[in-house]
Image (cartoon, rainbow, N blue to C red):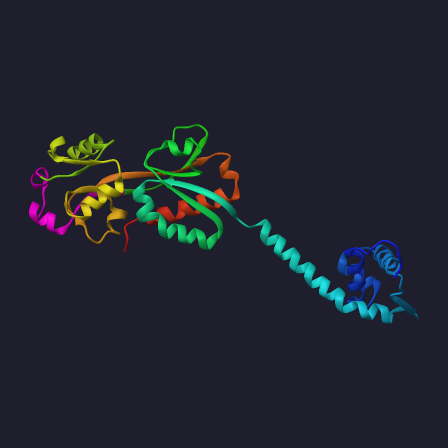
Amino acid sequence: MASGENPDWNQMRALLATVEAGSLSGAARKLGLTQPTLGRQVAALEKSLGVTLFERVGRGLVLTQAARELVAPLRAMGEASETIALVASRQSQSVEGLVRITASDVYAQYLLPPILLKLRQVAPGIVVDVVASNEVEDLIRRKADIAIRHVPPQEAELIARRLPDTVAKIYGTPELIDRIGRPADERALSRADFVGYSESVDIVLAELQRNGLTLSAANFPLLTNSGLVAWDWVRRGMLLGLMMKAVADRTPEVEEAWPDFVGVPVPTWLATHRELRTARRIRVAFDLLAEALAEASQPAN
């Protein structure tokens, strides 16, 4: 072999195309080149290899023995090149990296698991870190990339999508409701004990009063800052509790304590930082969460 420059892939591809097309003109059309350009590439390959690849017979070209021995490895290289291009294309479209999602502990426990499984199927390269927190500051302090909130974000650097509202109703175990009395009405429920949320007991109290219940702080003997703890107390039959219907429908131990109660609307927003929305992994997770949460917020069948 000559000691000239090593052949590059364009030169070898020119030879393979000429072999497969049977002529320089056919190979040029296949590769989108002019015939003189293709001819120069084949000549450069002959020079770098130090061998003659074609012999002219009349107006045609005939492969030399040296060229015929190159055909098989050149075809293997061609297939490898196509595989590399395919893999590169897939990688350029891949979605991978860490995505932190903050949501209330109740959402994280009851509504996120099937959504996370779907996200794993759609984008297996994404690593999800769920920050189960009831604090709305998590996103603005950059402790998370995406936040599921029940209040609209006020920060200018955030963007949000309003999801369909769900509804919260009053639930208890069948045994507790039996003790309160069936059918439970406003009068019976006004004597019942309810679980309270440490930071929002006044809000819950006012909402239930607005809907016709004569309640006071005395109706909330147990308070907690954890939605999961509060819901566990309801599941155990300790007290009645206000909860999103989407969660209660996934909790077989409870039933509606006041079937005539229309419920309290629960708005939901999905928020992220504006610059993070342009990151593909964040955008994919954000869009999938929006679609799946809209479905999950509806009552289970």
Give the quarter of the figure containing the C terminus. Answer: bottom left
Q: Along the horizontal axis of the image, is 213 left or right of 292?
A: left
Q: Residue drawn 69% across and 59% down?
A: 81
Q: Is residue 126 left or right of residue 71?
A: left
Camera-nearest residue between 150 and 97: 97
Question: Residue 247: x percent and y percent?
Answer: 27, 47
If the image is split into quadrants, where does the N terminus sit? bottom right
Say if residue 216 shows up in the picture: no
Magenta span covers which residues? 167-191
Residue 285 visible: yes
Q: Is residue 279 above or below residue 300?
A: above
- Looking at the rendered structure, the number of numbered marks drawn on it comes to 0
Residue plotted at (42% across, 35% down): 143
Q: Is residue 1 above or below residue 179?
A: below
Q: Is residue 175 magenta?
A: yes
Q: Position of residue 220 (x, y in %)?
A: 15, 35
Q: Residue at x 69, y 63 (%)?
A: 79
User: Relative to residue 84, is residue 217 depicted above or below?
Assistant: above
**Could you tell me which residue is drawn at 28 percent across and 39 percent down?**
266
Q: Position of residue 102 (x, y in %)?
A: 38, 39
In the figure, is residue 201 to the left or right of 38?
left
Q: Which quadrant holds residue 202?
A: top left
Q: Where, by quadrant of the figure, is residue 72 drawn?
A: bottom right
User: Compared to 67, does 209 lie above or below?
Assistant: above
Residue 252 horizontal/vertical position (percent): 22, 54
Question: Does 51 appear in magenta?
Answer: no
